[in-house]
Amino acid sequence: MERIGFSLAFDAASQKLQAQFKSEEGAQLPDRAALDAELAVKGWSGFYLDEAAISAFFEQARQLAETPGAKPLELVIGERRDGSFKLDIAADKMSVSLTLVAPQGGRSVVDEVRPALHIKGIIHGIQDAALNEALAAGHCEDVVVALGTPPQEGEAAHFDSLIEALREAQFEAGEDEVVDYRDLGNLLIIHAGTPLMRRTPAVPGIAGTDVFGKTVPAQPVPDTPFSSALKGAAPAEGDSNQLVALIDGQPVPCANGVDVNPLIEVEQIDIESGNIQFDGTVQVKGDVKAGMHIRASGDVVIGGTLEAAEVVAGGNVVVKGGIVGRAEAQGATHGGAVETAIVRSERSVQAKFIEHGLVEARQDILVERAVRQSELSAGHDVNVGQSGSGQIMGGHLRAGLNVRTGVLGSPSGAPTHVQVGFDPYVNRDKLGQEALRKKKLEDYAKLRQLLDFLDKNPAKGAGGVREKAEMTAKAIQDEVRDLDVLLHKLSEQLALNEHARVQISKRVHAGALIQIGQKRWEALDDGPGGSWRLDDKGELLSDWVGR
């Protein structure tokens, strides 16, 4: 039953629904029940309704009823809306999402979705189950209705070294076989034809397909071959993916391959043999006499004694008979001339004993018996003696991490300085890299001046001159960035190693000085052994109790 004074009207042109109220005799104020009833009678219940507008209409109708003679109230409270949909295609064309809005009194567009996919050319990876569910529901938001097939990633070529397996096989010992402490653990000599590395070729990726049915190529993967600059090694005949040694020598891993350093073997280094400078490994069966020198890029193994001679090695140095420099007693005491044995190794040094020697190793120094009046520097550890034996008498020892021995100092009170905590090599390396960086920046500045000149005089840059200068400048920039990374790492390594420790198992004599970082401890009299390290606050901590 129509309420007096209240009515609804629909404008087909604008699709707007209008509520009307007229203050007249017998008029009844409209309410929600009357509105819903009128909508049902008119068949407009499914229209979109603006609830805020409806509330405003009811309030204004109430005010109008209290104002005789006022103009009739007319207010838009809703509208008829057709359904709509949107297809969102991902930027990479690998997915399509559907947002479907249900109609509100208007036309449904459910039947238009599939044709729209076809019109847009979306033909691959239609997700029928998800699409059917969304269409049946009549509405959805961001439902994926098409998915491309992504390309499958390939696998780059990779290299597997066989060297460690060779090393393990070399040092396999029987149950009753005694392994000599003096044998160098990481010296490996191989023969021509020995397999060194296995290369697994790249596996190409598999192309995919986007939602338009277009091919999506897989990312290319590098099929890196063995290095073309290998020394003493080459791919095997008949198997280009296996690297074998061409000569006898020492295998040295490098980028994308293994070099084989040739091996030289001599009976003795003296005036008759002459000095040796060799790109590889040197084995000396006997002694290296005073005044001689050996410079090798690989390991140096001396079966006898190293006298007051010099050995510089890119690998390890082993002296099975000990290192013996010469010092006249008077000269050694009063600063006179001293003939010293000098050993510098980029890896480790191992000797039976060291007397009057200057020994430097980037990794460890291992001495079987004793060190006397020598200067030792190791990036990691200095170990003198086995199972609590060994003695360090006089001289100065520096180690990045640990010094271990049985006895420190001598009954005569010879000054014996042990210093740990800082890698003695790092600061030297840092200074060298800083100088190199400065030189690179100077070269770059000169190139920039050249490029500025060529910009002003284009004709001078013809024939590839400018392009070459630009490439060189970019290469220098890359090198400087790499140097910055290296310098940052070296700066971090200059920090005190908090795990640094000095361990003396048996006895400490007066005259011994132990230093960790900047903290020092000096033995004023003889006493038992002990252990020295820094505590959490950076203070020197020791369990030494004196006599």
Image (tube, rainbow, N blue to C red):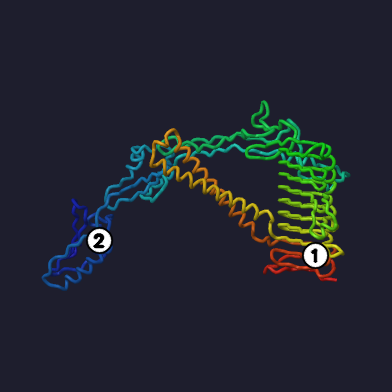
Label 1 SS: strand
Residue at the far top in the pictured view? 238
Tag 1 residue: 512
Disc 2: CA contacts within 10 A as few (<14), some (14-19) or many (>=20) = some
Q: Is residue 363 above or below residue 498?
A: above
Tell me if residue 128 can be seen. no
Where residue 163 appears, as percent x and y from the top left, is: 72, 39
Disc 1: CA contacts within 10 A as few (<14), some (14-19) or many (>=20) = many
Q: Is residue 165 above or below residue 5?
A: above
Of the image marks 2 and 1, the number of the one nearer the N terminus: 2
Amino acid at circle 1: Ala
Q: Is residue 359 above or below residue 115?
A: below
- Is 450 in front, or is 337? 337
Label 2 SS: helix
The CA span between labels 2 and 1 is 107 Å
Tell me if residue 170 can be seen. yes
Quadrant placement of the C terminus = bottom right
Residue at the far right in the pictured view? 176
Q: Is residue 258 left or right of residue 211?
A: right
- Is 219 in front, or is 282? 282
Amino acid at circle 2: Ala
Q: Is residue 90 left or right of residue 435?
A: left
Quadrant position of residue 45: bottom left
Quadrant placement of the N terminus = bottom left
Q: Is residue 111 left or right of residue 358?
A: left
Quadrant position of residue 190: top right
Quadrant position of residue 391: bottom right
